Amino acid sequence: MYAVIKTGGKQYRVVAGEKIKVEQIPADVGSEITIDQVLMVGEGESVKIGTPVVSGAAVKATVVSHGRHEKITIFKMRRRKHYQKHQGHRQNYTELRIEAISV
């Protein structure tokens, strides 16, 4: 069984037992959270699509860790104008382990 969930403005396809990195969630490490914005649930040939969410569906996940992604380098330059700008960014994330998908 799999589900498509929405968290942090992004959509993720998840399966029970899988680890995913999502936008930072204010929760303690080891705590269990419930994601109720389930857009789609599928099992084999049967698929249930929500409008916009599947009513009564939820995904239980455990917070594994918090961290920061790799640094992304931003470099801007205008040729022949003696303009260069260097910037960097590291986005925070929360790593979740999907425990169960309930419909």
Image (spheres, helix red, strand yellow):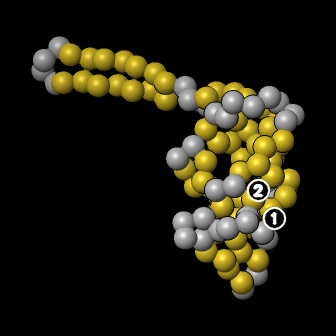
Q: What is the secondary structure assignment of the residue under circle 1? A: strand
Q: Which residue is drawn at 60% across and 71% down?
A: 50
View extreme (front): residue: 56
Q: In which quarter of the image is the N terminus?
A: bottom right
94 sits left or right of 8 in the view: right
Mark closest to the chain's N terminus, 1 or 2: 2
Residue 8, placed above or below residue 56: above
Q: Mark 1 points at which residue?
A: 102
View extreme (bottom): residue: 45
Q: Which residue is drawn at 76% across and 81% down?
A: 44
Q: What residue type is labelled 2?
A: Val
Circles 1 and 2 in contact, beta carbons < 8 Å:
yes
Residue 13 visible in the snapshot? no
**Mark carried by residue 59:** 2
In the foreground, 72 or 59: 59
Percent position of residue 49, x then y: 61, 74
Percent position of residue 93, x then y: 65, 33
Q: Which amino acid does label 1 sit on?
A: Ser
For disc 1, the neighbor class at 10 Å (few under 14, some 14 to 19, many from 20) is few
Q: Quadrant of the C terminus?
A: bottom right
Q: What is the secondary structure assignment of the residue under circle 2? A: strand
Q: Which residue is drawn at 26% across and 17% down?
A: 84
For disc 2, the neighbor class at 10 Å (few under 14, some 14 to 19, many from 20) is many
In the foreground, 73 or 42: 42
